[in-house]
Image: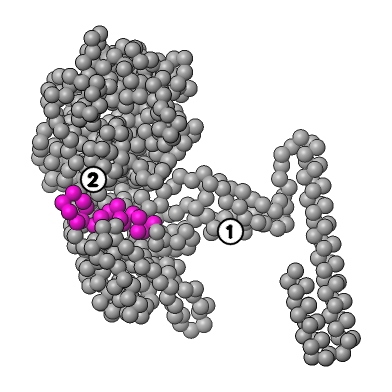
Amino acid sequence: RHCYGHDQSIARSATSNQTPPLLVNMAVTIRSMIMAITMAIFTARIHVITGFSTALRHQGKRINPPFSTTVTRLFAAKTNISFTPNPEIRDKATSTVLVGRHAALKSLIDQTDSYVSLFGFRPHPEVLSSMHSALDGNAAAGGSSSSYVIVPTVGPAAPRPPHKLSICALKNSVTRNNHPLSLHAVTDLVRGATPSKGVTHVMVLVEDYFGLGPVGAAVGRSFPLFNRKTTKKSRVGYADKESDNEAENEDDESLVHVTFLNSEGKVIKNQLEIAAAEAAADGVRLACRLVDTHPEELTTTAFAEECRSLFENDDTVTIEEIVGDELKEKGYGGIYNVGKGATHAPRLVMLTYNPPEDVMVTDDLEEDKSTIALVGKGIVYDTGGLAIKSRVGMCGMKHDMGGASGVLGGFMAAVKLRTPRKIRLFLCLAENAIGPNSVRNDDIITLYSGKTVEINNSDAEGRLVLGDAVAHVTKHCDDVGLVLDMATLTGAQLVSTGKMHAAILANTEELEQRAVKAGLASGDLCYPLLYAPELLKKEFNSKVADMKNSVKDRSNAQCSCAGHFIESHIDENYQGGWIHVDMAGPGSKAERGTGYGVGLVLSLVGAPGFDTRQ
């Protein structure tokens, strides 16, 4: 078509300038010859492809010919994140994102003599000033401004394409129940400012006060790993395998390099803190990937295999499992009965991290070296059981293992950082499915604590599996001084503490304050619930068992009641602490996992370099 239009314009031009008819006829003839040859090639190609495909069809085979015009691939758009300081990234980057509090950014932008060391080139000061001035330092969600700038080249070097420069300004000051850097806003702003392709240099102005680990987790949350979308790209003729693979890698992967800056705009190079940021980001992305994975793929079996693959080359971690009928035989009636109706057997996965002997104990762990046990609710899919959920209510229930993914991600990051404290991890894995073997309302089951539970709501299953796990920990693990269970437990949590703050229940006021402090430091925000077991346990009264599993009055501190149910299965001889984290709200956002819990765990176990500055 291009040739046709081009030749017509030549012919019209020739006619208008009164060119001799012979030249006009020659142009028309050439045009006709080009069209004829093009159509002949195109028709021959169609016949070849059609004939080859038909022959394969007749043989009963579904094989694409080697010169298929379309290639379809799964798992598109992978983003790699790097945190190691690298000056060369300034020359490789095709876009730059500068993040910080509004006032701190103003101070940095005014230092015009540092532009080259920051960006690798010198954007005009007025460009940056005008971009910054357009942003509001008091906006709750922050704001971003972007511009394309020309990057000059020296000598015979090829011209560089326009460079995308973005400024993301955070709120200057926040209220007492938020992280000072508004880490939720960091995630949203970085995600929005980062192009889907190329190399992006993200510079975060953490100033001299804020830990790198929580910021690394926030940036990691911006780039989830799980994706089952397909991508298509045209390809003509026989593909060169090597060059085609290179093209695929170039199309599918992008790189985000994160640099942290202090108050003076200088690059932070502390290896321990940077390692903590990288480990936190890896933990968050792992948790997000697991939460996002659909239940057909992430079965209880696959979840357990994921755990083994994470630590198969790490001799500091040991793994044990109790699976299927063995749960029943050993008395784990909560996990067994919740998962017995599913295709894949329920299981209790137990991991133990023993720090190497040469790990240095930090000052804050000198006084309290007790083991911390992490317990996660891992309901890989929750139909509600025979108390079945509605069509709308059931969608998204693949997220019901968010507690297990959060503590697993935190555990993995703590192991990577060689945290100088023994950590135990218990994952209660089951699918609350519907089938002939499903637990029924009115059934009475016995949990590992020895207490009997009358089922009056099979959709209140999370507390049953967690009850078994906390009973096991407090009965058998004498070295444990703190048990933390984490779960997407109740819809009432969102009513109690909202979509960004988990609800916590602790058996001492000191632990309650410790958890809130850890939430503020890590960005995994949380807020206390009413703690009054003597007033609330009556909601579970049963005529025929020790308790029911769901409350009688849903308007009576329902979220606290659910936590107290779990607490009632702690062994009576246990003298340590207990924290319950209900993160049904903050565990997901916009149909994606958030990786909530990773940062909270790292802060509570005292992972080195995570939320403190040296």
Find disc 1 in the rendering and name its residue: 247
**Region rendered in magenta:** 174-191
- Please identify, in this view, whether the residue under mark 2 or under mark 1 is nearer the observer: 2
Query: Residue 556 placed where, x, y %?
Result: 20, 28
The reply to whether the C-beta atoms of the residues labelled 2 and 1 are less than 8 Å apart is no
Query: Residue 135 placed where, x, y %?
Result: 30, 68
Residue positioned 44% across, 19% down in the render: 341
Residues at marks 2 and 1, CA–CA distance in whole angstroms: 42 Å
| Left/right of residue 242 with respect to residue 576 in the rendered view | right
How dense is the environment of label 1, judged by Cα within 10 Å: few (below 14), some, or many (20 and up)? Answer: few
Query: Residue 477 placed where, x, y %?
Result: 21, 25
Residue positioned 74% across, 37% down in the render: 61
Q: Looking at the image, is 202 positioned above or below residue 351?
A: below
Q: Does the rendering let one see residue 146?
A: yes
Find disc 2 in the rendering and name its residue: 525
- Amino acid, disc 1: Ala
Residue positioned 88% across, 81% down in the render: 25
Is disc 2 placed on a helix, strand or loop? Answer: loop
| Left/right of residue 309 with respect to residue 460 in the rendered view | right
